[in-house]
Amino acid sequence: MVQVRKAPGNISADARTINGVHHTLSVWTDKDAMRAYLTADAHLEAMRLFPRIATGKVVGYPAQHAPDWSEVHAIWLERGRAV
């Protein structure tokens, strides 16, 4: 979480467990900044070290505002794609 929060273009990042599932929520200035972080060494290394959390569903989409945690689980269920 420290590295994502320091990444260029990151506005905010947080993590929570909802119904036994680990979720992260990050907000970016733009899609290019988000993709740059996802393919950077820090993120790839975290996924290698924590394979249990590197599975499941992901959701990424442009929005006028970040969802709050009360919305995140429903969005994840509705729009998530398996990785």
Image (cartoon, grey):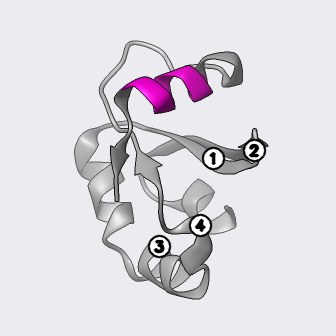
Q: Quick check: 42 left or right of 78?
A: right
The residue at which mark 1 appears reads as 23
Task: Using the image, determine if residue 32 lies above or below residue 42.
Answer: above
Numbered disc in front, either 3 or 2:
2
The residue at which mark 4 appears reads as 53
Counting residues from the start of the chain, the first of labels 2 and 1 encountered is 2
Counting residues from the start of the chain, the first of labels 2 and 4 encountered is 2
Task: Using the image, determine if residue 81 lies above or below residue 44.
Answer: above
Most extreme residue toward the left is 32
Numbered disc in front, either 1 or 3:
1
Neighbor class of circle 1 (other Cα within 10 Å; few <14, some 14-19, many 20+) is some
Measured Cα–Cα span from mark 3 to mark 2: 18 Å
Measured Cα–Cα span from mark 1 to mark 3: 15 Å
Q: Quick check: 16 left or right of 31?
A: right
Looking at the rendered structure, the secondary structure element under dot 3 is helix
Neighbor class of circle 2 (other Cα within 10 Å; few <14, some 14-19, many 20+) is few
- The amino acid beneath tag 2 is Arg
Q: Are marks 3 and 2 in contact (CB under 8 Å)?
A: no
Looking at the rendered structure, the secondary structure element under dot 1 is strand
**Can you tell which mark lies on residue 43?**
3
* Residue 53 locus on image (x, y percent): 59, 66
**Does the magenta-highlighted stretch encompass residue 75?**
yes
- The amino acid beneath tag 1 is His
Measured Cα–Cα span from mark 4 to mark 1: 9 Å
- 69, 65: nearer the viewer: 69
Span shown in magenta = 72-78
Residue 73, quarter of the rendered image: top right
Secondary structure, magenta segment, majority class: helix
- The amino acid beneath tag 3 is His
The residue at which mark 2 appears reads as 16
Counting residues from the start of the chain, the first of labels 4 and 3 encountered is 3
